[in-house]
Image: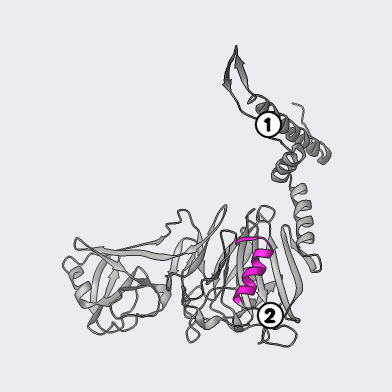
Amino acid sequence: MDTMIFSEKDYKKMIETAVNVSVIGVLVLCQGLLPIHAGNVRVAQVTAPDFDTGQIKMRILNEFSPEVRKKNFDTMVRQKYPKAVINDITSGVKHVKLTKYYAGKPVRINVVEVDMKLAKDLELTPALSSNQTLKSRRTISTIAKNNNAVVALNGTYFKPQTGVPLGTLMINKKMYTGPVYDRVAMGIFDNGFDIARVQLNATVKGSGKTIKVDNINQPRMLSTYVLAYTPDWGKTSPYAPKYGMNLLVEDNVITKASANPVEIPENGYVISGPKSVLEPLLEKKDAKLTVNTSPEWKNVKHIISGGPYLVKDDEVFVDMTAQKLGAIGGRNPRSAIGYTADNNLILVAVDGREGSSIGMTLMELARFMKQIGCTNAMNLDGGGSTVMYVKGQIVNNPHQKGGIPLSNAIILSSINDD
């Protein structure tokens, strides 16, 4: 049997032919929509649109030809950041260093922009500082190297004393922590992103009753809240609230009730809340925890929270007061994440609190994210936490050399790495 061998030139010619045929097909279809007459009766009146065949051809080539897509990405980034230093990190990943001026003073900015279709061997995911417990902090270089990350940026807020993330964090469809004040979060899917204010929709069912669970692996805010603590929280749960109880659940069966801290089993969790609310579960001692979010976000793989919004549906939108983030106003180092209409990912780190870079206000950051093409974007933890890692190096200038130890980060790493 004869073997057909295609050279690169043959492949390009084949793609070009397919594109030309597609364009012709579109034009033929449009001709078919012209007015049809039957005698003096007009049957249809549809005007063919004024198509730019060159533009259609380029869009199709951009989708099916990696070479064309790379060229277009290179051109777009150069035009978007005309006075910046631009470095190629890997296929589809650009690191951009630039300086902007506000009130005549400099602000140093690092941007990583990613064409996710070109960077098809990379995955965006949150990463914890430890795979053993939420109560951990490590430098971003350590987090990045432990996960073979090409790029890393500090992630969501966390409790400084313990390292427990404060807000929604899901990794590989596993919910580690629930939302705080239903703050905005980014959902990461196989084929794109979404940003919305997220609430927890969780319940524990047992003894024929359904009880609302207010949060997962978060510090208690109200004594009336029902909280769930999984093994990721640590070895033991906190004390139950006043007039409350802790229920130890193993394999969906309640095996212990106590007001004191309870050891959290690997095959279960601890439910903690008011005794009057939880006591009915002891009737049959069965308990099943179900965790969802609102919005539901079907097929979401990862979620990382932040706040406030910076860009919402292509408009500058800073809801700092609504998300109870008044304490982070002013001019500071900033971190942000967003995406464009074409699902390009954008990560930003802004230096501040020094003469050579004065930082940004949230409104300035929002306008910058909009300016560089984000249709949706949100603020991440900033201040002393702001640190960006690219290909083995810290590329910004955090106040503490190397950046402070962090609870978590958002990383780009190879999908082929175990």
Relative placement, left or right, of 326 versus 98 is left
- First to last magenta residue range: 362-376
Give, as a three-letter code, the residue at label 1.
Answer: Val
**x, y (%) of residue 382?**
59, 79
Q: Tell which circle, 1 or 2, labels the residue nearer the N-terminal end.
A: 1
Disc 2 secondary structure class: loop
Q: Is residue 281 visible?
A: yes
Residue assigned mark 1: 26
**x, y (%) of residue 251?**
30, 65
Q: Is residue 145 visible?
A: no
Dividing the picture into quadrants, the one containing residue 13 is top right
Q: Does the magenta run of residues contain 137?
A: no
Residue pictured at 52% horizontal, 67% vertical: 304
Residue assigned mark 2: 351
Relative to 187, does residue 227 appear above or below in the rendering? below
Q: Which mark is residue 2?
A: none
- How crowded is the residue under tag 1: few (<14 C-alpha within 10 Å), some, or many (20+)? some
Residue pictured at 77% horizontal, 48% vertical: 67
Residue pictured at 61% horizontal, 73% vertical: 363
Foreground of the two, 175 or 24: 24
Residue situated furthest right in the rendering: 9
CB atoms of marks 1 and 2 within 8 Å: no
